Amino acid sequence: MLHLPVASKPLALVTPTAATPCYLAPVSISKTGGTGGAGSRGRAPTTKRELRGDLVGSRLFERSFSTQRGLESGRAVTAAAASAGEGKSGGADRGSSGDMDSTKRPAKMQTVIEHVALFSMAPDMAEEAEGDMLSHLYSLQYHYPHLLAISLGRIVAKRPVGFSHALVARFPSRPALEGFLAHPALAAAMDQFVTPACTDTLSLSYEAQVEADIESVFRRGDSFERGLEHVVLLRAKPAAEGDKQQAMVDALCALPLAIGPDILVQLTAGANFAADTAKGFTHGLVARCPSEEALDAYNKHPSHRQVLRQHVLPFSETLLAVDFQVDPVGREERV
């Protein structure tokens, strides 16, 4: 929950203002921009346990991503970690010949924690205050090594939602998220730049599954360089049974396969485990679309509409959806 820990007050969510594009913060600033990953330095893991634990935290990925050789090395480590048992896997085992067609095997999956925070910035705040807030939140990746990916920006207000800015951060585990929320750098950013500028906040966190490859885990590479982040928070009806809620999450998570990467680069969804900062919202969804046209196509896609009709709307009491643009920091001026 980007229940961004504030040193003295709870994180306040920014109130949405006019519909304007926002600037997104990639986890690592590079020539290509886009969201990236950050990890922790240290010796290479020597056991399966260490390998699994360091999959998302290892600085190896960040250090070597800029070279093709490094990228291949990172992919090899990711594959090794997946084989060691991290996350859930629906893949079939290789036969004795070891030459099973990889295109017929479901992808190995990696468990991650998604943290979503919404902010309501005071309407009379100067643009400089907005820039300071976003910049300091973005820079937290340099203070906390286990933050895998981060994106943030001004909400493109196609509908009144009560929030002006959004942040999406990814972590390898719940302990990593807890460490981030307790970090002094976050407390300082909250006290100095967020709390003074914002009148309200909301955050939630959920566990999700992504493909166990470097681009998917760290949200890096050409597919993640730019586009729109589509964030949905929903409050399940009290009468909705647990199996119905899980069926909803499963149906949402199956949409990327049904719709395709040209429209839906990645989608995660799950049940919130941070009720104290979520204002009653029980589930979250984060989807990355490569363009505004792709986002429109996603919203209108028959598979998406069918999931809404059958699994989401019948069991949901409230839905809140926001979008913000993902553009490399420093590559374009904010409007």
Image: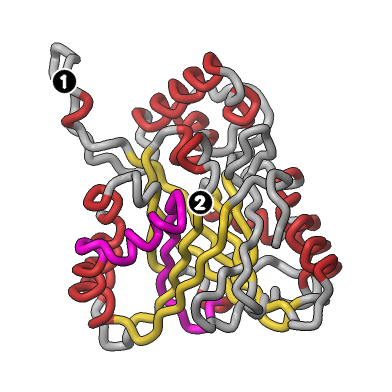
Image-based side of 4 in relation to 325, left or right:
right
Q: Residue 59 or 333: which is nearer the viewer?
A: 333
Residue 15 position within the rendered picture, expressed as x and y whole percent measured from the top left: 65, 80
Which residue in the protein does label 1 denote?
A: 100
Q: Secondary structure at mark 2?
A: strand
Q: Residue at x 33, y 66 (%)?
A: 299
Figure disc tally: 2
Q: Secondary structure at mark 1?
A: loop
Sequence-earlier tag: 1 or 2: 1
Residue 201 visible within the image:
no
Q: Residue 274 or 296: which is nearer the viewer?
A: 296
* In this view, the mark in front (1 or 2): 2
Image-based side of 174 in relation to 3, left or right:
left
- The vertical placement of 268 against 234, above or below, is above
Q: Which residues are magenta?
A: 278-304
Mark 2 surroundings: few (<14), some (14-19) or many (≥20) residues within 10 A: many
Which residue in the protein does label 2 denote?
A: 227
Residue 332 position within the rendered picture, expressed as x and y whole percent measured from the top left: 69, 49
Amino acid identity at mark 1: Met
Q: Residue at x 42, y 33 (%)?
A: 213
Residue 318 position within the rendered picture, expressed as x and y whole percent measured from the top left: 39, 84
Amino acid identity at mark 2: Gly
